[in-house]
Image: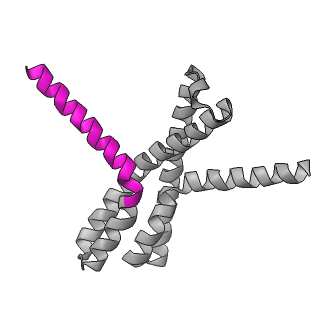
Amino acid sequence: MELLKKLGQFILMQIAILGFLIAAPALFLAVPFVMIANGADSDTMRGVAIIFLFAGPLVSAFWTMIVCMVRRVKRMTNGNPHAYKCSVQGSFAAFGWMLYGFFGTLVAEVAFVLLAQVVNLTPVVWFAAAPFVVFSPLLLLWAWRRLASRGRACVAW
């Protein structure tokens, strides 16, 4: 009976973590501004910023993997997801995208925090820019693919 209780707790914890990772982009945008609008003190906002910075690389790794693997499946199957075959290469690709998202966000956050100390940003500006910093690996990848596709179109023209 104890084993079933522990298994149930484990499953509920995994569901909660997955729910947070899925909802995190919306939470990162909404929660800080709601707190600022309600007049939260600077210590509370500092705590939210620390949570934001610690959760950011994990959330970015999750979303980078999801977006890039969906693109991979579409590219490999020409839009038919049932034709995709699970492979070791796909697992390594997913792991690689997660590492790119995690470490890319970590580097961007360190640069952002150092820049924010030099410029002395207000909480509103800091929290307005922070989601772009957290998802910067995904934004850079999107921009790179967009420029590469335009480059191919120009060459083929």
Could you tell whether 54 is left or right of 131 in the image? left
Secondary structure mostly seen in magenta is helix
Q: Picture coordinates of residue 118 (x, y %)?
A: 48, 74
**Is 34 situated above or below 71?**
below
Visible residue check, residue 113: no
Visible residue check, residue 7: yes
Could you tell whether 96 is left or right of 38 in the image? right
Q: What colour-coding does the image apply?
A: one colour
Could you tell whether 47 is left or right of 66 in the image? left
The quadrant in which residue 86 appears is top right
Q: Nearer the viewer, residue 138 or 103?
A: 138
- Residue under the point 79% across and 54% down: 150
Could you tell whether 90 is left or right of 102 in the image? right
Which image quadrant: the N terminus? top left
- Residue under the point 53% across and 33% down: 94
The residue lying furthest to the left in this view is 1
Q: Magenta stretch: residue 4 in it?
A: yes
**Is 45 situated above or below 103?**
below
Q: Picture coordinates of residue 125 (x, y %)?
A: 44, 76
Q: Picture coordinates of residue 25 (x, y %)?
A: 42, 57
Q: Magenta stretch: residue 12 in it?
A: yes
The segment highlighted magenta reads 1-26
